[in-house]
Image: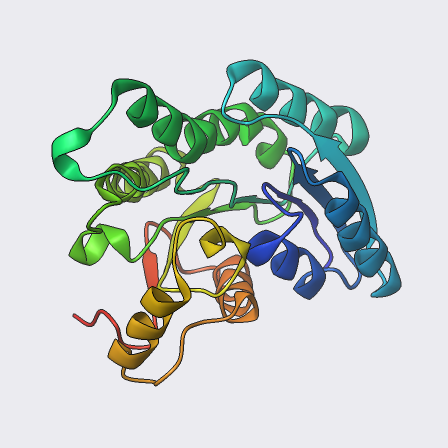
Amino acid sequence: MTKTILITGASTGIGAATARFLAAGNTVLIHYHRSQDAAGQVAADVQAAGGTPHLVQADLSTEDGCRTAAAFAAETCGQLDVLVNNAGGLVRRCEADRLEWQLMYDIFALNTFSTMMMSSLCVPLLDRGTDPCIVNLTSIAIRHGAPTATIYGASKGALDVFTRGLAKELAPRIRVNAVAPGVIETPFHDQVTTPERLEQFRASTPLGRNGQADDVAHAIRFLIENRFATGETLDLNGGLFMR
């Protein structure tokens, strides 16, 4: 696999693991917002693994930030083979009877609008690529709800629908799929999930553990390489949700 890959939110967690896992022989554009030092370490790891890293800083919860990242990809590489829309976050928990308008907007801007806009802006670059594809990151929250994180679950549910719609619209030129991770032990949970709650998730999972970022990176690579997959959302949660 020799690809030009843009990964959003690639300084930590799933994005960083994916950048490292896909590094060898590939050009990897590592997007970050605030975590410059962590992004720099990912870039060093990509280079050490035989890849060519490029760092791009932007706030993807804004239109200007999305345009900045897409323009950087165009100017630096001229084309893309893979777009991994990983940037996102819960922001903070909020009970369903206390929803706040600004919080709803912030969560949708970070998780949903950013992926929609980045996908749209990168279509011309992907059209120049080889076997191009988009992989979106949704969540197990789209399957069974997310108490105190209903806004986050809704924002990821919108991406699930967007993935299928975009797959149909861009076929057969560009494949579009998604991964819906379960509970993955990354910095995502540091400020929003207590150790006790993480332990409850682990105990409820049939495989007896929470996921690791590398588990998701493997799934992303599968969707990149499988040329007969489009419009799919791959559940990856240790059996916490089954259908």
Vertically, is 207 above or below 23? below
Q: Quadrant of the N terminus?
A: bottom right
Residue 106 percent coordinates (x, y):
39, 25
Q: Image height check: is 239 above or below 17? A: below
Question: Foreground: 146 or 28?
Answer: 146
The residue lying at 88 percent from left, 63 percent from top is 48
Residue drawn where x is 71% and y is 61% of the image: 20
Position of residue 75 in the picture relative to residue 97 (left or right): right
User: Which residue sits furthest top?
Assistant: 64
**Where is residue 19, by image quadrant?**
bottom right
Q: Position of residue 69 (x, y in %)?
A: 65, 27
* Quadrant in which residue 198 is drawn: bottom left
In the displayed structure image, the side of residue 164 where residue 185 appears, left or right:
right
Q: Residue 28 or 148: which is nearer the viewer?
A: 148
Viewer-closest of 84 and 74: 84
Q: In the shown orientation, is residue 181 left or right of residue 60? A: left
Q: Is residue 59 above or below residue 34?
A: above
Note whether 26 is above or below 118 in the view shown: below
Count of marks, rendered view: 0
Q: Position of residue 47 (x, y in %)?
A: 86, 57
Residue occupying image coordinates x 66% and y 34%: 34
Residue 209 seen in the current view: yes
**Residue 236 visible in rendering:** no
Residue at the limit of the structure toward the left, as seen here: 97
In the rendered image, residue 32, in percent from the top left (x then y), is placed at: 66, 38
Q: Quadrant of the C terminus?
A: bottom left
